[in-house]
Image: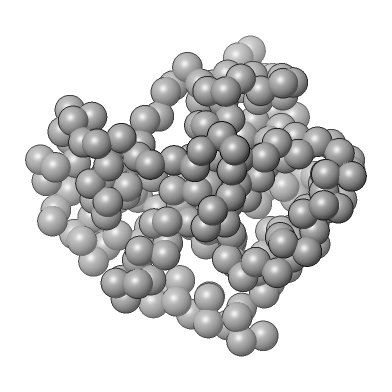
Amino acid sequence: MSEASPLLDKASIQQLPLFENLTHQNIVVIENSEQCKSIEEELKNAEILGFDSESKPTFRVGEVSTGPHLIQLAMEHKAYLFHVNSSTLKFLQPILSNPQQIKVGFGLKNDKHIFHKKGIELESCVDLAKGFSHFGFTQQMGIQKAVALLFGQYLSKSKKIGTSNWARKPLTSQQISYAAADAYAALLVFEELRKQKLLPAHISQTIQTALQA
């Protein structure tokens, strides 16, 4: 299937059945150390996590982003959305910096930089955007196209929600669904590529090294 495939044009993708996201009961918003403690064992035992982050947009020229404002981690049946503050960052630091825990996502190019500014070095982070050359795609693949290609589903990506205020409390239900879907869909894409033995060699090597360490 090539980049010119009619399946992956915008209109065709929008005709597909909707992506089956996690239910709201399985999406948990975390904002304090007590909540972090309650999920500590569960998260620290996860070998592979869907990963993404959201930042409040900047609109003025020269305005510096203070993000990330939200960090998303997803497992097979649950997603956690962390409001970024000193206690949640302290909790997340050993997970995000753990070379033996794989974090998978799309478009993670800038994440290392913005997390470094927060004092967190991202380790064993796998960007799936470049993992579709075996399908004939030479350009980076976005999560929406990847979901359409692998699952025949439409992952809605509202620009209005994507550029909304991710520092707000409480988040709207639309923001919660949007943020969880990004991390959860990335995990599903990774698992499907792995199941079909289609992970690119450099990604397979990263995972093998991390899980054997």
Note whether 48 is above or below 145 in the view shown.
below
Q: Residue furthest bottom?
A: 212
Q: Is residue 89 left or right of residue 62?
A: right
Q: How is the image coloured?
A: one colour
Quadrant of the image for the N terminus? Answer: bottom left
Q: Position of residue 195 (x, y in %)?
A: 35, 72
Q: Position of residue 169 (x, y in %)?
A: 74, 21
Query: Residue at the spot x=86%, y=53% of the render?
Result: 37
Query: Residue at the spot x=17%, y=48% of the render?
Result: 3
Relative depth, front residue between 210 and 64: 210
Relative depth, front residue between 13 and 203: 13
Q: Is residue 22 left or right of residue 16?
A: right
Quadrant of the image for the C terminus? Answer: bottom right
Relative depth, front residue between 117 and 9: 9
Question: Number of marks in the image?
Answer: 0
Q: Is residue 88 left or right of residue 174?
A: right
Note whether 194 is above or below 1 in the view shown.
below
Q: Tell me where residue 29 sits by quadrant.
A: top right
Q: Is residue 159 left or right of residue 34?
A: left
